[in-house]
Amino acid sequence: MRTTWSWIFVGLLAGVLFSAPASATIITINGSDFTNGLSSQTIGGLNWVATQSSGPQRTFQKKTLGGYTGVGLSGGATSDEIDIGEFLTASIPVGGLPFWVPSITIGVLFDGPEFGDVQEVAKVTINSLSLGSQSYTLTNTFQWFGPDVAVWSGPGTVTNLSPSTSGGGAVWRITNPFGSINDITSIQFTALAGACGFGLCNNQSDFTLVQLKYEPIPEPGTYAMLGLGLIGLGLLARRRKA
């Protein structure tokens, strides 16, 4: 009878071990992965939707500039970028794992005078299981001389991949944008009003999402179950030796 229960115990532990998710890998979602004309789409395991604060339904609309393809929204002040009052949102599906974000890449975030732009501002809002809603901004700041500079209000570092000049894509990569926050359930992109840097400044903030990298993180309970399983197997092995 004891042998039977031992095998049952081993079987249960094996189920725990094999049901535990493999080590997570970083998933890359590119602007080119979206389908023009759709208002919702599942890409890379996240549910994406295009919405707006008022007006007709928005849909995904891709845009390529300076060799970089990003996704924006139809309609609005600029028909293929994310404008003020427009929202591109990604969330985990029911039963999905929360995640950590290694990097975000944003395009066509200019500082003027190109296209009559202001110093454009992108707003990124995340929802965290532990911290709730957290918002950050990326602002392209006009420079008379020297390299382009964009300021991110959160942790991490900003790298310019394509200049914000005529013919450039004004592309910015934010590495480790949210620091150690690894229980994110959704991320949203929209634009905020920007101040005039130089030029006409008659075109307010708008931008595209070029790339999002994220890594699903197993919940602590999964690791606890795995640890208990390993301890149980160790105790069983010791008992058999004795």
Image (tube, rainbow, N blue to C red):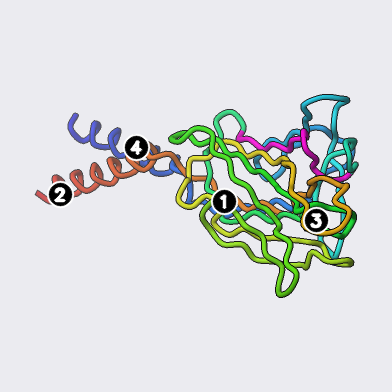
Q: Which residues are magenta?
A: 80-92
The amino acid sitting under disc 1 is Ser
The amino acid sitting under disc 2 is Arg
Measured as percent of width and height from the top left, residue 21 is found at 47, 44
Residue pointed to by mark 2:
238
CA distance separating discs 2 and 4: 17 Å
Residue 11 is labelled as 4
Tags 3 and 4 touching, CB below 8 Å:
no
* Local secondary structure at mark 4: helix
For the residue carrying disc 2, how many other residues have a C-alpha within 10 Å: few (<14), some (14-19), or many (20+)?
A: few
* Local secondary structure at mark 2: helix
Q: Earlier in the sequence, mark 3 or mark 4?
A: 4
Measured as percent of width and height from the top left, residue 223 is found at 36, 43
Instruction: Give the camera-side residue of 83 and 74.
Output: 83
CA distance separating discs 3 and 2: 63 Å
Residue 107: in magenta span: no
Q: Residue at x 70, y 51 (%)?
A: 29
The amino acid sitting under disc 4 is Gly
CA distance separating discs 1 and 4: 50 Å
CA distance separating discs 1 and 2: 54 Å
- Numbered disc in front, either 3 or 1: 1
